[in-house]
Image: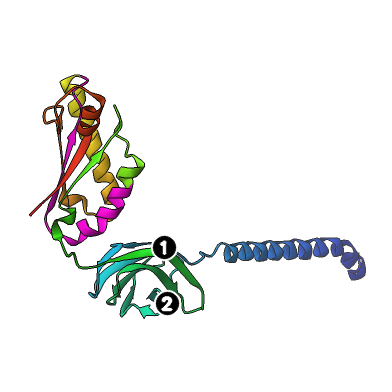
Amino acid sequence: MNRSWLLVLLAPLLLASKCIRKGQEEEILVVDEDIEAVEQKLQVVSIDPAWGAEGEPFAASVYGAGFQQGARVRFGEESEAARVRFEGDVRLGVTAPPLDVGRHDVWVLNPDGETSVLRGGLTIQGAQDDAAACESATLYFDFDSARLSPDANDSLQELAPCLAAVPGSIRLEGHCDERGTTEYNLALGERRADTVRRTLVGLGISPDRMNVVSYGEERPATSGSTDAAWAQNRRVELLVIR
């Protein structure tokens, strides 16, 4: 067999080999494009602590995704963090500047120009004219329930900045009305106090500051076996102890 016939026989095999290599190269390119498509998008999720005192700088951590080395952090439209420490693409350590009373947006600005904002993420609390304003409070519950009512939840939202600013431990006392067994009411009172504790933790209050205790039906706020008396006794009392 001469060389020309050999080339005729081998030509289909050579063409098939080139097609396979080309297909493999195209498949690799598609995979590369998919990797680029899943890059993290910049997002600000939270700041801890979410409260600060008027006119005082403080350290905080900003959490989210897609943070870059050299990112800047701004509060509101003009106040920029004096120091930003890159701790990974999901966390930035910052030193917040002195800020005015009110709620401030938290901005993260990446070096590539991408920005993200957490609206109203930081609350600055003014100096307490009366420190006792949040040192005691009473939260009321529905019959046989450990769920916060909308009014009780609103009260905790208002109390949280003050509680964050004052020193001391926080005692949460759970109480019930006279109906039910002693054992059941002790457990229900504890569940009510623990609901308040978990809500305050979500609002930025350290769990290490809070102690939960239940008195069940043993310490009524008012005597009597009426609906009005029972409503006053289904409660959690919050006390700041210095």
Left or right: 185, with 90 as reference point: left
Q: What's the residue at 14%, 27% (across, down)?
A: 223
> Where 83 falls versus 236 (above or below)?
below
Q: Which quadrant of the view contains residue 174?
A: top left
The percent position of residue 229, horizontal first and vertical second, equals 21, 28
The percent position of residue 92, horizontal first and vertical second, equals 35, 69
Q: Is residue 168 magenta?
A: yes
Give the residues in magenta: 154-180
- Residue receiving disc 1: 64
Left or right: 141, with 13 as reference point: left
Q: What is the three-letter code of the residue carrying label 1?
A: Gly
Q: What colour scheme does the image use?
A: rainbow
Q: What's the residue at 20%, 27% (across, down)?
A: 177
Left or right: 174, with 101 as reference point: left
Q: Nearer the viewer, residue 129 or 111?
A: 129
Q: Which residue lies furthest to the top in this view?
A: 181
| Mark drawn on residue 77 | 2
Q: What is the three-letter code of the residue carrying label 2?
A: Glu
> Where 34 falls versus 211 (above or below)?
below
Is there CB contact under 8 Å for labels 1 and 2?
no
The quarter of the picture where the N terminus appears is: bottom right
SS of the residue at dot 1?
Answer: strand
